[in-house]
Image: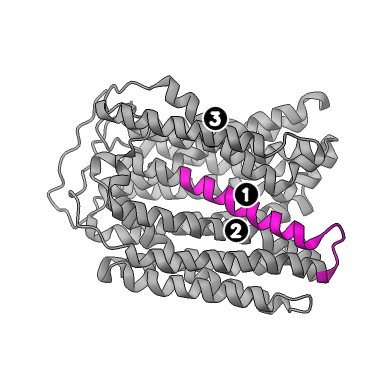
Amino acid sequence: MTVTPNVSPTPEKISPANRIVLALLLASAFVVMLNETIVGVALPTIMKDLGVDPVTGQFLVTAYMLTMAVVIPLTGFLMKRFTTRQVFLGAISLFVAGTAVGAIATLLPESIQFGVLLIARILQAAGTGVMTPLLMTTIMTVVPASRRGVMMGLIGVVISVAPVLGPLVGGVIVTFLPWSALFLTILPLGIVSLVLGMRYMVNITPTAKVPVDIVSVVLSIFAFGGIIYGLASFGDRVSDAGGLPPWVPLTIGLVALVVFVLRQLRLQRTDSALIDLRIFTSSTFTWALVTMVVMNAILFGSLTLLPFYIQEGLGADPLQSGLIVMPGGLLMGIAGPFVGGLYDKIGPRPLIIPGAFITTFALTLMAILFTPNASLGTVAVLYLVLCSGLALLFSPLFTVAMAGVRPKYYTYASAGIGTAQQIAGALGTSVFMVIYAMGRGTTATPESVADGTHGALVVAAVASVAIVVFVFFVKKPALQEEPAELEPARV
């Protein structure tokens, strides 16, 4: 079925139908991203209950990341081939199915519980991987160019708040309830999203019977899956526990990536690429994406590192650790729409340039002041300062990147951003944790933990200088075509 949207006669307004769809997508994205980090804190409990070792248990996180790495590059094709309604309902259905399977895992024979739980996480990740690219493409399609900053700011709420709340919510649940409650808590939220989607989700972009290049799909699996698994293995030190050496999947991934890129360059001549790399002919998109890669590496690396420093170095418990980093995530979420509104009025540079300097300043102070004797208040305040700098960067860079490409490439741009975020997150986590482990050594004393943390933060501060340089190359793109109205088609 092909859907041809009509041009909106009132380009400065968002229609009621559009508002409902955007609200539904934002809420659904928040739920799936909250779920993404909610299980990590419960891993020790799950491994103990199921009798699995750390290497095996870690696959509940690694398999999730790998599935995301495989699914996200496919979203460009999916959103071209299928209607918005079909893509959304398919993604939410997979997520709900995975959550339901996870909820009943403990009711099954013990011998298959872990395998069932692994399948549940893979199904959840398959649905989650589609959601953010779908949300970004929808905003670029239905929101007037002059108001996209505010809407992209709302994406910042989802991306920054949900992952921070996940470990805190998960910690509270496993403290007072069985770990299966992690899934039982999320399941009703997923079902509500599915029911509302069946009622209100409508089609947005036209569809076409575009072919899928199977070779590109296979190459993307090896490329992005190999890179992310290799980086995650470095960060988790899986090789030290007898697993596959990290350099093996990383090398395979890099080689596959080169072949994947060469194939896309050839296929895009006939508009049949899995990810059309002509999005990188826009310098606006490229500079914004490169800046986001460094920024996300620092964000996810710090989110992984700080709990170790707070708990091993300063003697806080997991709940205190979650409460210390939570204000930073909430600040980013609350600031998102306001920063987006400012973007619509004054453009990106008055926001991202100060944001870059604040980020570098905060990381430098963290590297200096995070000692064995630092107070928890100092950690909370400096992390808050770091998040304030990142808040000035997030939504403007998202908006600039998406608005920097032609509307026909929105789906590919959103897929490219999502894939880059996954790689950046794995890279930042790996680098931070490897440096931390080298400095910490085999004995976790307050002094050794501080040494490891200092080394990682020094690298982060140096890397953040690149953000300061890059933001001067980012500029506000010219306004693109006006948004389309939604056609209330049903499938």
Q: Residue at x 72, y 75 (%)?
A: 376
Q: Position of residue 291 (x, y in %)?
A: 43, 58
Q: Nearer the viewer, residue 358 or 170?
A: 358
Element marked by disc 2: helix
Label 3 with label 1: CB-CB less than 8 Å: no
Name the disc covering residue 155, or none: none
Between the residue at mark 3 and the residue at mark 2, the CA separation in whole angstroms equals 30 Å
Amino acid type, label 3:
Phe
- Local crowd at mark 2 within 10 Å, few (<14), some, or many (≥20)? many
Q: Nearer the viewer, mark 3 or mark 2?
A: 3
Identify the mark nearer the N-term, 1 or 2. 1
Per the image, is 457 magenta?
A: no
Per the image, is 421 magenta?
A: yes
Residue hosting label 1: 37
Element marked by disc 1: helix
Name the disc covering residue 222, or none: 3
* Vertical placement of residue 42 versus 472, above or below: above
Residue hosting label 2: 164
Q: Which residues are magenta?
A: 419-447
Q: Is residue 315 visible?
A: no
Identify the mark nearer the N-term, 3 or 1. 1
Q: Nearer the viewer, residue 31 or 446?
A: 446
- Local crowd at mark 3 within 10 Å, few (<14), some, or many (≥20)? many
Amino acid type, label 1:
Thr
Relative side of 300 to 212, left or right: right
The chief SS type of the magenta part is helix
Amino acid type, label 2:
Val
Label 1 with label 2: CB-CB less than 8 Å: yes
Q: Position of residue 139 (x, y in %)?
A: 32, 49
